[in-house]
Image (cartoon, rainbow, N blue to C red):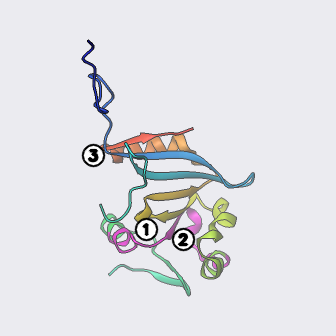
Amino acid sequence: MSSGPGNGAAAKGALDLPAFSLDVEALDLGADVKAVSLEILETESREPVRGKQAISFREAGPRCIVVPHPAQEQLRQLLERFEAEAFGVRAGDRVNTDDTGLTDELSQHGLDAYQAAYRRYSFCAVCEFEDGWVTLLSETIWSSEVIRRVRPAAQSFDVYIARPQ
């Protein structure tokens, strides 16, 4: 009689993965749009991770504020403040100038406005932390580059970084 694992028990030597995975992959939003999807999942079930596991700014439009170059503590506070809401982030030289066209579009149409504007920036991102995902729109940052840059920060957490195909 064989004494192999039963009832779903893992065999000795099986890959012991962390509880969470960060899936990073190219996202198809059309021929003219380059995007990368980042999503935090429970490794075993592949279900999305949900819920919760005094800063200078300028109002740029009715539903748009700009926080230029936040310090690390300010960024942490902003991310905590907006963790239950969808919000956008953009980076690049143009952030330092008023982009009234984009802020008008953001105020009227929400984060979909980034799809037409992201080429003017290093990147634009749509963040939905409560549901565990970020969509990064960029002409220069590919999924492999995202993984290379995220890996050092993720090492202090028990997260497996995957590139599903």
At a point 38% along the width and 56% down the height, the residue shown is: 49
Whichever of labels 3 and 1 marks the residue nearer the N terminus, that label is 1
Please say whether residue 97 is one of the residues in the magenta stretch: yes
The correct choice, above or below, for 77 with respect to 104 in the image is above
From the viewer's perspective, tell me whether residue 147 is left or right of residue 123. left
Image x and y of residue 22, in percent: 42, 47
Image x and y of residue 128, in percent: 47, 65
- Nearest the camera: 62 or 159? 159
Q: Which residue was labeled with disc 3?
A: 156
- C-beta proximity under 8 Å, tags 1 and 2: no
At a point 28% along the width and 22% down the height, the residue shown is: 13
- How busy is the neighbourhood of tag 3: few (under 14 within 10 Å), some, or many (20 plus)? few
Please say whether residue 65 is one of the residues in the magenta stretch: no
The correct choice, above or below, for 146 with respect to 1 in the image is below
The correct choice, above or below, for 7 with respect to 79 in the image is above
- C-beta proximity under 8 Å, tags 3 and 1: no
Q: Which residue was labeled with disc 2?
A: 96
SS at mark 3 in the image: loop
Residue located farthest toward the bottom when viewing the structure as drawn: 62
Q: Which residue was labeled with disc 1?
A: 69
**Amino acid type assigned to the residue bearing label 2 in the image:** Asn
- Nearest the camera: 7 or 95? 7
Image x and y of residue 158, in percent: 29, 44
SS at mark 2 in the image: helix
Image x and y of residue 57, in percent: 44, 80
**Amino acid type assigned to the residue bearing label 3 in the image:** Ser
From the viewer's perspective, tell me whether residue 27 is left or right of residue 65. right
* Residue 84 position by quadrant: bottom left
How far, Cα to Cα, is label 1 from label 2?
Answer: 9 Å
Q: Which residues are magenta?
A: 77-101
- How busy is the neighbourhood of tag 2: few (under 14 within 10 Å), some, or many (20 plus)? few
The correct choice, above or below, for 111 with respect to 43 in the image is below
